Structure formats: structure tokens, C-alpha cells
């Protein structure tokens, strides 16, 4: 998604990192719009799709790009244990991309409706309302914790879960969009 406006003063954007510009104003997220049949947007925000690309496939381009970018940003490698907190479309895509990179993946999702498609795609899911996620991660990792956790759910509880499942030197990748920053309570370093 391209920002609506930019005045050229953001250091990140001047360095070629428009995706982390401090002045991002996403249409439909930071500005009114979206969730309607017709929508007028600036032509500069549009990208022409090839005629051969079906719209149901085209709809997956942006969320798949998010998944690929974030799995790369987290430097997921073969054999790592990855927990994805949030089993919506982006969370499932992140899980599939991490799995394709060779990681072992678990998806933590409260909604049975969202767990079902993840399971149908061959992903292992856990229900935080019914399962002790810490105990499951401990059993799965030999009590060492996950190598990587993706927080894709948004609520504070999702951030807490993602932090809590990490092992020593584990990597947290926060993906969910939220209106205010979430507090992160990092685990204490081991003693002794």
C-alpha cells in the first residue's frame, strides 16, 4: 500500500524505505475509506495487474508480500521453531512462508473459525482459551522456547503470548497494525 501523502522530510523514505516512513498515511487505515463497493483513490497508489491474473489470486499479492517480507525480516531458517500468534489471512500466510523456509510452525488462534482453514492447509494450531500455550511450547521445544514468534493478532494478549513463547535470544516480529503502541514486557535474562 502506498501512502497518501509525503512531504520529502522523512529520513527513512529519503533512504528508500517508504514502507517504514514516519509519515505513512495508509488509505483505509490511517485515512477514511475502504470496505465499500466503489472508492476513489489517487492514481499514484494503483498498480496495473496483468490481464492474465485472476482477481481472486491478485487479492493475495499484498498479504503474501507482507508474509514474505516479515519472514525474511525475522531471518527464519530451516529447522527453527516458529510460533505465529494470530491465524487470520496474514498470520496463515506467514506460517506457510515460514514452513516453506523449512521451519516447524505452530499457529496460536482464539477463533475456531480461523483455526479451521489453517488446519486444512496442514498447519498445527493451538487454542489459547483451551490450551496452555507455554506448556505446549515447552513440550514442543524441550523447554527451550521458540526461535521466532510473529505477533499478527493485534490485542495486548497476543503481544504477551508472542513474547512469552520465545526462547533465549528468540526473535519477535510484530506484524499487526494497531492504533496505539503495545507495551512489551521482555522476559528476564536467566540467572546463574
Image (cartoon, rainbow, N blue to C red):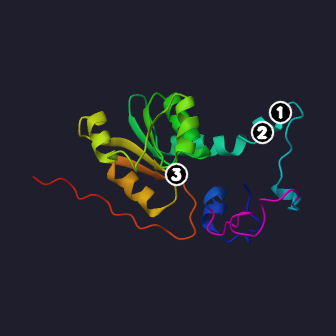
State which region is magenta: 21-38
Q: For the point 36% across and 41% down, which residue is it?
A: 147
Q: Please provide percent x and percent y for residue 113.
A: 57, 44
Is there a contact, CB below 8 Å, between mark 1 and mark 2?
Answer: yes
Secondary element at tag 1: loop
Q: Please say if 158 is above or below 79.
A: below
Q: Which residue carries the number 2 mark? A: 58
Q: What is the spatial separation of the Cα atoms under label 3 and label 2, in whole angstroms?
A: 22 Å
**Screen quadrant of the N terminus:** bottom right
Q: What is the spatial separation of the Cα atoms under label 3 and label 1, in whole angstroms?
A: 28 Å
Secondary element at tag 2: helix
Q: What is the spatial separation of the Cα atoms under label 1 and label 2, in whole angstroms?
A: 6 Å
Query: Residue 3 sits in which quadrant?
Result: bottom right
Q: Sequence-wise, which precedes: disc 3 or disc 2?
A: 2
Taking the image as shown, residue 120 lies to the left or right of residue 24, namely left
Q: Please say if 4 is above or below 93.
A: below
Q: Nearer the viewer, mark 3 or mark 1?
A: 3
Q: Please provide percent x and percent y for residue 157.
A: 42, 60
Q: Sequence-wise, which precedes: disc 1 or disc 2?
A: 1
Q: Residues within 10 Å of mark 3 (few under 14, many from 20)?
A: many
Q: Which residue carries the number 1 mark? A: 53
Q: For the point 13% across and 54% down, which residue is it?
A: 191
Q: Nearer the viewer, residue 163 or 77?
A: 163
Q: Main secondary structure of the magenta part?
A: loop
Q: Nearer the viewer, residue 169 or 40?
A: 40
Q: Nearer the viewer, residue 65 or 31?
A: 31
Marker disc for residue 152: 3
Is there a contact, CB below 8 Å, between mark 3 and mark 1?
Answer: no
Asked if residue 114 is among those painted magenta in the image, a careful observer would answer no
Q: Please provide percent x and percent y for residue 161.
A: 38, 53
Asked if residue 31 is among those painted magenta in the image, a careful observer would answer yes
Amino acid at each position: 500500500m502506498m501512502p497518501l501523502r509525503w512531504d520529502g522530510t522523512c529520513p527513512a523514505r529519503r533512504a528508500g524505505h517508504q514502507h517504514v516512513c514516519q509519515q505513512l498515511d495508509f488509505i483505509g487505515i490511517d485515512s477514511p475509506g475502504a470496505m465499500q463497493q466503489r472508492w476513489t483513490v489517487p492514481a499514484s497508489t494503483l498498480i496495473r495487474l496483468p490481464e492474465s491474473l485472476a482477481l481472486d489470486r491478485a487479492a493475495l499479492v499484498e498479504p503474501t508480500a507482507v508474509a514474505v517480507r516479515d519472514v525474511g525480516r525475522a531471518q527464519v531458517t530451516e529447522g527453527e521453531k516458529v510460533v505465529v500468534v494470530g491465524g487470520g489471512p496474514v498470520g496463515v500466510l506467514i506460517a506457510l512462508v515460514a514452513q516453506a523456509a523449512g521451519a516447524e510452525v505452530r499457529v496460536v488462534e482464539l477463533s475456531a473459525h480461523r483455526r479451521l482453514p489453517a488446519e486444512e492447509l496442514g498447519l498445527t494450531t493451538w487454542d489459547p482459551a483451551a490450551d496452555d500455550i507455554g506448556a505446549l511450547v515447552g513440550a514442543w521445544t524441550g523447554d527451550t522456547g521458540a526461535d521466532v514468534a510473529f505477533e499478527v493478532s493485534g490485542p495486548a494478549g497476543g503481544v504477551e503470548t508472542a513474547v512469552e513463547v520465545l526462547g533465549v535470544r528468540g526473535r519477535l516480529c510484530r506484524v499487526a497494525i494497531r492504533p496505539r503502541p503495545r507495551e512489551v514486557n521482555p522476559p528476564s535474562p536467566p540467572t546463574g
